[in-house]
Image (spheres, rainbow, N blue to C red):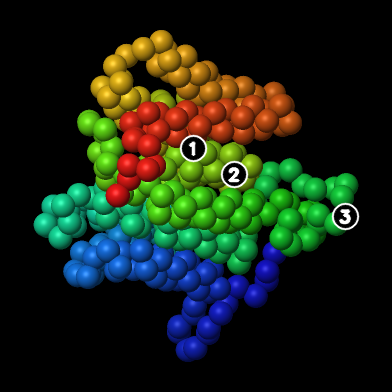
Amino acid sequence: MNSNTVAIYFNDLVIYWSSVMIFCGALAFITMTLALWKPKNPRSAALGCFFPLAILFSFFLSRLIHWYFNMEQYAASFGAGTFSSIVPAFTRFTIGSYCLPGVILGICLAAWVVCKLGFVTSSGRLLDFAAPGICLLVAFIRLSALFNGSFIGKRPVTTVKFLQRLPFCVTVTDSAGNVSYRPAVFFLEFLLMLVAFFALLSFFYRHRTAKMYYPCRSTGNVWKMFLISYAAIEIVTDSLRTDKPLMHFTFLNKLNAYSAFISIAQVVALIFLLYVFFYYYVCSISTNGFNWKHIPALLLFLASIAGFGYFGEYSIQRYGAVLTGYLSMVISLFVDVLLCRLLYNSCAPEPEYYD
């Protein structure tokens, strides 16, 4: 692990390398969105409103989600009660952390607000232009873990010496001085999000202007492709990490027996998958009429949910079936993404009819 975490130290000003990395991600997000937006939209007032709101909402929601499921961290540090611990959560940033799903939800909320203010006719259209840049933002946020010791793997690498170094592994020293080499899961997600960026950029140029068959909207499709790409990547990589945020309720503590081992990021990612699949599933039936192909598509989707849920994550946690569990998870998520794309194709005309 990189021990030099401070980038700038001047009097009382301390800027960490992880913060610099996240700033680079935000800059890449803004630059990419502007690059895609400006040739099509001479007036950029919408983006002038969108970017500040996206940053504000992303910060607030990602911090709020982490606080809600980890109130004891903030209460213990400042001697506050459960409810009052929200004050130090938003005034003292030396403790606690942030949940990445809040960033995605914050950007989506910002686009909705910009649409309601009348700067754009559809929030989906704005999110289409922003989606490739969000891939870069997520990639840099994950890469920032290089400097803060988070998002590393559970099981140490002990056999292959070549892998016991960056970017494959990070060195971890426990309180007893024992050294181990943990997989750099943050770098894996960084690479996967870069792959998703190029795939999404290709989809943007080929399909953004497609005139979809009613009732499927012509806007928001690039954004939906981002959601399923992000969801598939996040479910796998979040399962690999040792410090994933769990759904530990403070007020509804009776639910903890069923939820305390479940990752927040994985639950949100599953919601994204369900939303995109059933959106295109309903649109496909409305467009083409219900036929026999829709039945195996639904059954296969539900089976794939069980594949990465029960045969994947649950088997890994409960029985330690690492190899078969992750193999089931990857195959199931690939099937989910493929089904969503096939349903999208059933709602879209042939490419030669695109504008």
For marks 1 and 3, the one nearer the N-term is: 3
User: Element at badge 3?
Assistant: helix
Image: 203 above or below 249: below
Residue 266, label in figure: 1
Whole-Å distance between the Cαs marked 1 and 3? 32 Å
For marks 3 and 2, the one nearer the N-term is: 3
For marks 1 and 2, the one nearer the N-term is: 2
Whole-Å distance between the Cαs marked 3 and 2? 23 Å
Residue 161, label in figure: 3
Residue 234, label in figure: none
Image-based side of 149 in relation to 251, left or right: right
Instruction: Decide: few, some or many residues near mark 3? Use Cα within 10 Å; few <14, some 14-19, many ≥20.
Output: few
- Image quarter for residue 7? bottom right
**What amino acid is labelled 3 in the image?**
Lys
Dividing the image into 4 quarters, which one contains the N terminus? bottom right
Residue 237, label in figure: 2
Whole-Å distance between the Cαs marked 1 and 2? 10 Å
User: Element at badge 1?
Assistant: helix
